[in-house]
Image (tube, rainbow, N blue to C red):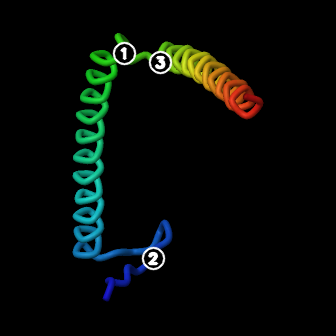
Amino acid sequence: MAKQQSKTTPGDVQTIEDLQKQYEQLNTQKIRAESDLSNAEKELQKLQAEATERFGTHDIAELEEKLKQMEAENEQRRSTYQTLLEGIVNDLEKIEASNEQS
């Protein structure tokens, strides 16, 4: 069961024990936040290094531009592939039609 924390308003008189508990809780939160920040910064550095290795940069704007270029290249390749396949299908249909007439 979670501890219920008594809410105080500014000006309420608190005992030294209450103030110490509050300090300890805040200090624990601070330590957790600092640890989370440190872990996030390490992860960011790791991901930036990975992006630089794979794509030559870790700049977001440059990565977005590279992504647009890659998507355009993929669309061009897909379109070319589709055109080639449609040509093959048409050629096969002509061959089948020619064979049926023979």
Task: Quickly name the residue at label 1.
Answer: 55
Question: In the depicted view, which residue is nearer to us: 65 or 42?
Answer: 65
Q: Is residue 4 above or below residue 25?
A: below
Residue at point 55% right, 21% down? 74
Question: In the depicted view, which residue is nearer to us: 57 or 42?
Answer: 57
Residue 7 is marked as: 2
**In the image, residue 81 lies at what x, y percent?**
58, 22
Name the secondary structure under disc 2.
loop
Amino acid at circle 3: Leu
Q: Is residue 95 above or below residue 20?
A: above
Which of the 4 image quarters holds residue 32?
bottom left
**In the image, residue 33 lies at what x, y percent?**
30, 49
> For the N terminus, which image quadrant?
bottom left
3D distance between C-alphas at marks 1 and 2 = 52 Å
**In the image, residue 6 lies at what x, y percent?**
40, 80
Amino acid at circle 1: Phe
Task: Quickly name the residue at label 3.
Answer: 63
Question: In the depicted view, which residue is nearer to us: 68 or 13?
Answer: 68
* Callout 1 touching callout 2 (CB < 8 Å): no
Name the secondary structure under disc 3.
helix
Name the secondary structure under disc 1.
helix
Residue at point 27% right, 47% down? 36
Q: Is residue 44 above or below residue 25?
A: above
Q: Earlier in the sequence, mark 3 or mark 1?
A: 1
Q: Is residue 91 above or below residue 20?
A: above
Residue at point 50% right, 71% down? 9
